[in-house]
Image (tube, rainbow, N blue to C red):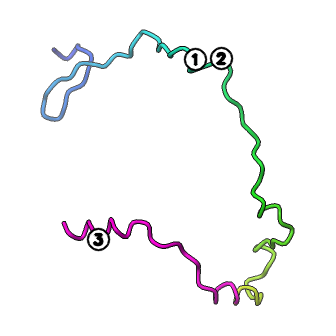
């Protein structure tokens, strides 16, 4: 393995041979790919709350609008922490 051999040499001086791509094409199991067509985009229905006409766009309100006072006065409703048990277990280590 000299300088003319394809591959690479590590910082410690060890020489590794080049990795050549596999020349054989992949063989897919029957029925995995039913056609040669690629799947297209499927149009989904928007969520019902997005179709509600009662929603306001926050960009329509200037920063000094009173609605922001109510918004920031209301604490966020966050879910309970799902990983609380994990934290307890990690502290034991």
Q: How crowded is mark 1: few (under 14 residues within 10 Å), some or many (20 or more)?
A: few
> At x 78% / y 49%, what residue is drawn?
45
Q: Is the residue 72 above or below the residue 79 in the image?
A: below
Span shown in magenta? 70-93
Q: Which residue, given by chain and number where applicable, does mark 1 sit on? A: 31
Q: Quadrant of the N terminus?
A: top left
Circles 3 and 1: CB atoms closer than 8 Å: no
Q: Which residue, given by chain and number where applicable, does mark 3 sit on? A: 88
Q: Which residue, given by chain and number where applicable, does mark 2 sit on? A: 36
Q: Which residue lies furthest to the right in this view?
A: 53
Q: Which one is in front in this view, the residue at disc 3 or the one at disc 2?
A: 3
> At x 28% / y 19%, what residue is drawn?
18
Q: Is the residue 44 above or below the residue 53 in the image?
A: above
Q: Is mark 2 on a helix, strand or loop?
A: loop
Measure the alpha-carbon separation of dots 3 and 2.
Answer: 51 Å
Q: Quadrant of the C terminus?
A: bottom left
Measuring from the top left, give residue 66's x and y in whole percent. Answer: 76, 90
Q: Nearer the viewer, residue 19 or 71?
A: 71
Identify the mark nearer the N-term, 3 or 1: 1
């Amino acid at each position: 393995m000299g300088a003319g051999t394809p591959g690479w040499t590590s910082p410690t001086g060890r020489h590794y041979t080049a990795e050549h791509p596999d020349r054989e094409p992949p063989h897919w199991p029957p029925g995995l790919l039913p056609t040669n067509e690629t799947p297209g985009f499927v149009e989904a229905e928007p969520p019902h709350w997005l179709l509600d006409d009662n929603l306001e766009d926050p960009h329509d309100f200037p920063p000094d609008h009173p609605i922001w006072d109510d918004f920031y006065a209301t604490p966020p409703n966050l879910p309970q922490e799902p990983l609380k048990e994990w934290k307890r277990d990690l502290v034991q280590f």
